[in-house]
Image (cartoon, rainbow, N blue to C red):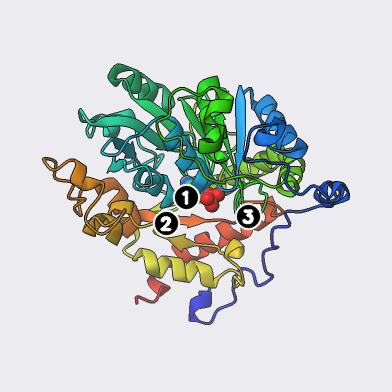
Amino acid sequence: MSKLAINGGTPVRVAPFPMRRTMGEAEKQAVMAVMDTDKISGFFGSPGDQWLGGEYVQAFERKWAEAYGFAHAISVNSWSTGLMTAIGAIGIEPGDEVIVSPYTMSASATSILFYGGIPVFADIDPDSFNITADTIAKVISPRTKAIMVVHIFGQAADMDPILALARQHGLKVIEDAAQAPGVRYKGRPVGCLGDIGGFSLNYHKHIHTGEGGVLVTQDAQLAKRCQLIRNHAENLLEYTGMEDMCNMIGSNYRLTEIQAAIGSAQLDKLEGLLALRQRLAAHLSAALQGLPGVTPPKTDPNCGHAYYLYPIKYDAAVTGVSRADLVRAVNAELPHAAHWEQTVLAQAYVKPLYLAALYQKKIALGSKGFPWTLQPEVEYNYAKGSCPVVEKMHEEQMIFTPIVREPLTERDMDDVAAAFHKVLHNLDQIPRA
Ligand SMILES: *Cc1c(COP(=O)(O)O)cnc(C)c1O
């Protein structure tokens, strides 16, 4: 019987997991080529050929669109502003309700508030962690205008039932595919299976431009509205002949030529990075199979997975050991993480969004309760208990790791699995906090 590292035994592994290296020769050369042009941004915010951006921005957008069969790709300076652009472009008006997952990054929901929309939260499925047609149907009201689906951790949500429900109720569908670039649902790339959606290009995502994002849509009119919002629509409305002026005030969400050049080089790597993450995940899942209390992420042939994070469901009732105690014991068997990307196990993921002060106090735009005040007859209480599955994941069951990623190998996954095996086969040794 081996002594657990947390009790002074020999850990499974001490050598640090290698850091991710995201930039290579191709990106360096792309940046230098832009530097030689001395044109670091090609955008003009006034009528003329360049209101759609410079040559690298436009080439990057074409490349992304063509790679996945999207009719239109529109780059933006972050996916948070991309989500705001999407909400504006589909015409969300103050007081409209938009249904969204509470188990996601805050910007999925705050993008709705920026246009005076009211986020309404649907619970998640306990295996995919995504919202479903069933959970969405429960919160549809006469005020609902759109559904925002988040493909959380990188796994595609079950879209066909959601799209059917949306059609039935005349709702728009937005996809927050920040964590799922290149992922397919029943063979079709996610992003604009509904009306509009897109991807984040921040440093932590699969591929990145430091900061950035890409909107995608099959709808030419929506694409134009996004291009306008991105670049001071109010200067350009007459020039572009846009008649629907709703939400066309616009701002500056433009990507630079340097970022676009980096993005084009990064895009060449996406399919390879995804394939590697999928291989590592399959290896780790096989090695964790059958351990008490631990459930590897559920795979679904229809719903592809990018493994932005690798989620593990934990059941303390099976082991008699709390999640926090288990995580501490497993982490002690593996190298200390000097950086987030080396973190072996973390717990909970995000707090259900509606429990944040913003929703509890309903103070968003101004200090008087706008936009909730636009629906005085409706009580938006965002009470604890509203979405029990999310709360259970956050409070009890979710364990996740960001290390199912390049440049790690199956050998590294074996070490992670060995740490789980050692700890879960010596449950009586685990110190209880
Ligand atoms: C990263 C992320 C965002 C925000 O993207 P940024 O580019 O950082 O603004 C939004 N939603 C989800 C689900 C994300 O993971």
Residue drawn at (45%, 66%), measured in percent from left and top? Answer: 327
Residue 163 location, x and y as percent?
A: 39, 22
User: What's the amino acid at mark 1?
Assistant: Pro
Residue 68 location, x and y as percent?
A: 64, 26
Q: Which mark is residue 311?
A: 1
Residue 98 location, x and y as percent?
A: 32, 36
Q: Could you classify mark 3 by the number of other residues whose Cα lies within 10 Å: few (under 14), some (14-19), or many (20 or more)?
A: few
Q: Which mark is residue 240?
A: none
**Nearer-N-terminus badge (3/1):** 3
Q: Which mark is residue 203?
A: 3
Q: Could you classify mark 1 by the number of other residues whose Cα lies within 10 Å: few (under 14), some (14-19), or many (20 or more)?
A: many
Q: Which residue is mark 2?
A: 349
User: Comparing marks 2 and 1, which lies closer to the viewer?
Assistant: 2
Secondary structure category for the residue under label 2: loop
User: What's the amino acid at mark 3?
Assistant: Tyr
In front of the other: 79 or 89 = 89
Secondary structure category for the residue under label 1: strand
Q: Is residue 112 left or right of residue 234?
A: left
User: Comparing marks 3 and 2, which lies closer to the viewer?
Assistant: 3
